[in-house]
Image: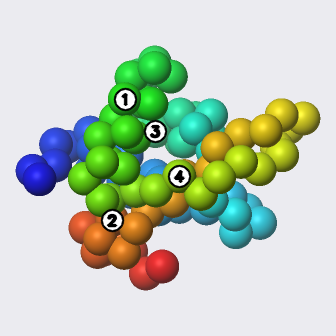
Amino acid sequence: MRVTKKQYLLINVIGTTNDDGDFLDIDQILDKLPYETSKQSLQFSIRALVKNGFAEKRGLEERRGQSRIVISLTKEGYRLAQLVP
């Protein structure tokens, strides 16, 4: 799969963690993106990364009083982002 500039930026944001070392949820990813986008657009982009094996949904976690889906990179995603898992 060919990755666009925005997808590459998204992969790099997903590869970061919270201050406590946990993976990010969708709202946290949206806050850290270096470009503006809607939550729906972000969800579409994440689905494409999951479908192509660069990211994965890690399940629900209780955060800020609600259950939220946590997103992380796969080994292929880390390799693309050149991050160390």
Residue 32's spot in the image, x, y percent?
Answer: 53, 41
| Residue 43 against residue 81 in the figure, above or below | above
| Residue 17 against residue 39 in the figure, above or below | below
Q: Hey, what amino acid is under mark 2?
A: Gly
Q: Earlier in the sequence, mark 1 or mark 4?
A: 1
Q: Residue furthest right?
A: 65
- Viewer-closest of 53 and 78: 53
Q: Residue at x 90, y 35 (%)?
A: 65
Residue that mark 2 sits on: 77
Q: Nearer the viewer, mark 4 or mark 3?
A: 4
Disc 1 crowd, CA 10 A, few/some/many (<14, 14-19, 20+): few
- Residues at marks 1 and 3, CA–CA distance in whole angstroms: 15 Å
Disc 4 crowd, CA 10 A, few/some/many (<14, 14-19, 20+): some
Residue that mark 1 sits on: 44
Does dot 3 land on a helix, a strand or a loop? loop
Q: Hey, what amino acid is under mark 4?
A: Lys
- Residues at marks 4 and 2, CA–CA distance in whole angstroms: 13 Å
Residue that mark 3 sits on: 33
Residue 53's spot in the image, x, y percent?
Answer: 30, 59
Residue that mark 4 sits on: 57
Q: Hey, what amino acid is under mark 3?
A: Leu
Q: Earlier in the sequence, mark 3 or mark 2?
A: 3
Q: Residue at x 9, y 50 (%)?
A: 2
